[in-house]
Amino acid sequence: MDQKPEKPTILVVDDTPDNITLLCSLLGEQYKNKVATNGPKALKIAETNPDLDLILLDIMMPEMDGYEVCRQLKADPRTKHIPIIFLTAKTQEGDETKGFELGAVDYITKPINPPILMARVRTHIALQEAHKSLEKQNEVLEEQVEQRTKELAALQDAIIIAMASLAETRDNDTGFHIRRTQHYARALALELQRDVKFAGEITNKYVATLYKSAPLHDIGKVGVPDRILLKPGRLTPEEFEEMKRHTIYGRDAIIAAEKSLDVPESFLVAARDIAYCHHEKWDGNGYPCALKGEEIPLSARIMALVDVYDALITKRIYKDAIPHETAMNIILEGRGTHFQPEVVDAFVKINSQFIAIAEQFREDN
């Protein structure tokens, strides 16, 4: 059996018992009534019942008049949304103006005319119900938008990993390199965030974007021929020049993706910087542009270290893996030449986290 809808609740505020009796008798069949005989009691009832649908408020009351009750109700975030209709014998235009300025929605003069009262009450109850319905719809819509945003973000992340894996699995059987470097980069960025030098630049949003973008750092490898990418021995100078072009291929692919998005800014800006510049060196001896120092985007400075670290500790077709301690010493040797000093210092502080990440995403998992 369908449950009957609950009656709207109206608070009647009047210091005259006869008026309360009349109002409750008129409203009783259609509405649920609460009663207050003075201002302080009305405020207390409203504060404990913020779901009231309407307040009928007498103006001329001792101790606290209706104007002051209205002012306090509208000043309280818990009760400011409750519509108020003033009931009063005052008929001057200034009295009505004051009531509306305080936030009342209507103004009914005494003696009460029952048909007018009921018509005004029905109108404002309907408006209040419509307002509540709209708020409910907005809440549902916000929840739907939030859920959809999460779904799109998850889909975006899955696509990024899939795209990155196309490149990584060509010279890495498991593709865990992208997972490790992604987590290294986040850990390193969070440590750098503690340094006042980077506090303004490395926000939480920046860290999230870096984490999302990091897997695309070697996407340009899809453009490198297998005979070069999978060569077990040392590359010739000509082959190495072609290998270096993976930074350009990656940048160009991401730029093309950005254009298809047709938005002024996106997380792909960081991905583009990382793909293009993660082989630049702090002293200017890197590639493809020989950028130096802070000319290199910070995201690429971070990725430069984590990419080298992972390459050192991981076995590849052309090299054996080396221990963490040896890799850390090589990175320390590159402090101020290959890598930004502060980035190296942050790495040293959290090197145990790198060990844990490497273990979590081992090649044999």
Image (cartoon, rainbow, N blue to C red):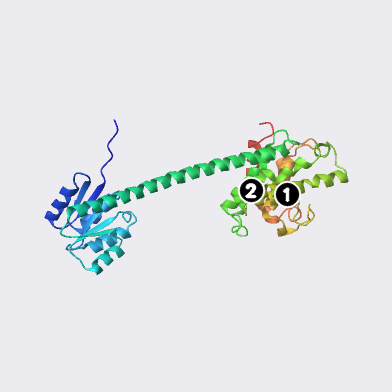
Whole-percent x and y of residue 338? 75, 53
Q: How far from the left and from the top, in percent, is residue 139?
A: 42, 46
Q: CA distance from mark 2 to mark 1?
A: 15 Å
Residue drawn 70% across and 59% down? 294
* Image quarter (top left, top right, bottom left or bottom right) of the C terminus: top right
- Figure check: 203 above or below 146: below
> In terms of image quadrants, where is residue 151?
top right
Q: Up-down: is 293 above or below 143? A: below
Relative image position of residue 29 (x, y in whole percent):
19, 44
Badge 2 marks a residue whose secondary structure is: helix
Residue 65 against residue 83 in the figure, above or below: below
| Dot 1: element | helix
Task: Tell me the residue that label 1 is attached to.
Answer: 251
Front position in the image: 1 or 77: 1
> How far from the left and from the top, in percent, is residue 135?
39, 48
Q: Amino acid at mark 1?
A: Arg
**Residue 190 appears anywhere in the view:** no
Residue at 75% in and 37% down: 321
Label ID, residue 261 = 2
Vertical placement of 311 versus 18: above or below?
A: above
For this view, does 169 lie left or right of residue 40?
right
Q: Is residue 345 visible?
A: yes
150 relative to 230 in the view: left or right: left
